[in-house]
Image (cartoon, rainbow, N blue to C red):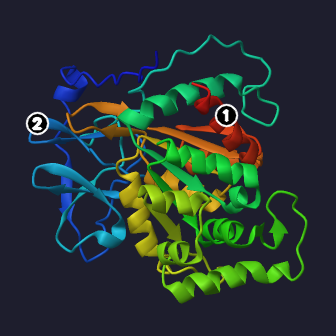
């Protein structure tokens, strides 16, 4: 029986906490500008002492600042800061400045390790069987008790089986939102419309005559109809990831990039507008699975804390997976400071098909 790891809160009756001073807040000197010695937030639960009470920042985000607003700690990006707002200052994290970073809120049993042992890192040689077993159980739990957000690159759209597996996951309730770019939607719609992805048959992978036009033809057709939903209806589209999202009302965010063709009508050309809507989807995420998209993965990792405060006030863990065939991409999150991410080095098309087969077996 799957159970979330319980949260162990700090004991604020300890002398180090009772003796700690109240945190200091200084006014922002200008819109979008924090005062000197501002405190940058992390992915971990952070408590701030205000009027003798330790307040948890309930919606924290990495590399953002904390503002005292109506008796609570409001975490936001620098660009959203307004002149005069009280901003948390202090660079210590153990209570000296009335700030406490709680990195061990979800303790995990650790086997005793010798000074020297093999295969401590996660690489292409790692055995991921246990990771898969845990993920199956987690997804079954989260389908009904959490919110699963998928961050996806275009690799799925190039393979028929992977597209069908992802569509099944959507149909079966294992997808609550998708964050992606123009390419995923374009090639998935191309697969549904013309049976190709970048001009190659999505099953045989054989290039079709003049196939390099196919993704442009698809984009152009979607733009003609004005939206993905209108394109699906008008052209009789009946399969694919975007079709399943539209059919089941699953929200998706397509963040644009400089290299985009077209782009498709719903793609956000303004990077900060894309950041805002991505953040809104991640704000309630309890499990995030990132697959074959390094930049979107890093973005999602920076936006996602290691915990979530539920409606009843419970603090629960946020599970974060990074799946990629490249070890560099998987390890990049650790380099960026998103230490709670679990990495799986594998082909993402195989990964999503394996998920579908095992989840559909029960």
Which residue is found at the position 59% from the left and 31% from the top?
359
Q: Position of residue 255 (x, y in %)?
A: 52, 70
Between 33 and 350, the one nearer to me in the picture: 350
Can I make out residue 213 in this image?
yes
Which residue is found at the position 16% from the left and 27% from the top?
18
Which residue is found at the position 80% from the left and 21% from the top?
118
Instruction: Give the left or right position of residue 25, taking residue 151 as reference.
Output: left
Which mark, residue 122?
none
Q: Residues within 10 Å of mark 2 (few under 14, many from 20)?
A: some
**Residue 25 to residue 184: above or below:** above
Q: Position of residue 169 (x, y in %)?
A: 56, 44
Q: Residues within 10 Å of mark 1 (few under 14, many from 20)?
A: few
Which residue is found at the position 76% from the left and 41% from the top?
346
**Residue 276 to residue 148: above or below:** below
Secondary structure at badge 1 equals helix
Which of the 4 image quadrants contains residue 185? Answer: bottom right
- Residue holding disc 2: 52
Between 98 and 101, the one nearer to me in the picture: 101
Can I make out residue 33 in this image?
no
Q: Position of residue 263 (x, y in %)?
A: 59, 82
Q: Position of residue 334 (x, y in %)?
A: 61, 44
Considering only order in the chain, which callout, 1 or 2, is on the residue closer to the N terminus?
Answer: 2
Which of the 4 image quadrants contains residue 103? Answer: top left
- Residue holding disc 1: 357
Q: CA distance from mark 2 to mark 1?
A: 53 Å
């Amino acid at each position: 029986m799957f159970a979330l790891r319980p949260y162990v809160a700090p004991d604020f009756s300890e002398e180090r906490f009772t003796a700690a001073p109240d945190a200091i807040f200084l006014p922002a000197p200008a819109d979008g500008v924090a005062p000197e010695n501002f405190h940058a937030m992390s992915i971990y639960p952070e408590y701030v002492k205000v009027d003798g009470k330790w307040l948890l920042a309930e919606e924290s985000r990495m590399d953002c600042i904390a503002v005292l607003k109506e008796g609570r700690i409001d975490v936001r990006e620098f660009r959203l800061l307004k002149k005069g707002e009280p901003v948390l200052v202090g660079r210590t994290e153990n209570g000296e400045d009335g700030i406490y970073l709680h990195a061990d809120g979800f303790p995990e049993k650790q086997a005793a390790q010798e000074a020297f042992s093999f295969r401590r890192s996660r690489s292409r040689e790692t055995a991921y069987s246990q990771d898969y077993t845990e993920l199956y159980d987690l997804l079954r739990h989260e389908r009904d008790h959490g919110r699963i957000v998928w961050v996806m690159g275009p690799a799925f759209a190039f393979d028929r089986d992977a597209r069908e597996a992802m569509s099944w996951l959507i149909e079966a309730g294992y997808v609550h939102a998708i964050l992606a770019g123009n390419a995923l939607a374009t090639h998935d719609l191309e697969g549904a419309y013309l049976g190709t992805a970048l001009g190659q048959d999505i099953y045989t992978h054989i290039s079709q005559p003049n196939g390099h036009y196919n993704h442009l033809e698809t984009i152009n057709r979607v733009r003609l109809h004005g939206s993905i939903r209108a394109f699906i209806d008008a052209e009789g589209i009946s399969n694919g990831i975007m079709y399943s999202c539209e059919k089941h009302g699953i929200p998706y965010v397509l963040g644009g990039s400089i290299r985009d063709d077209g782009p498709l009508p719903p793609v956000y050309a303004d990077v900060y507008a894309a950041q805002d809507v991505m953040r809104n989807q991640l704000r309630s995420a309890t499990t995030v699975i990132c697959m074959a998209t390094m930049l979107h993965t890093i973005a999602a990792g920076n936006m996602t804390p290691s915990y979530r405060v539920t409606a009843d006030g419970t603090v629960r863990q946020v599970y974060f997976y990074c799946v990629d065939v490249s070890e560099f991409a998987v390890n990049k999150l650790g380099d960026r400071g998103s230490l709670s991410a679990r990495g799986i080095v594998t082909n993402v098309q195989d990964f999503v098909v394996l998920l579908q087969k095992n989840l559909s077996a029960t």
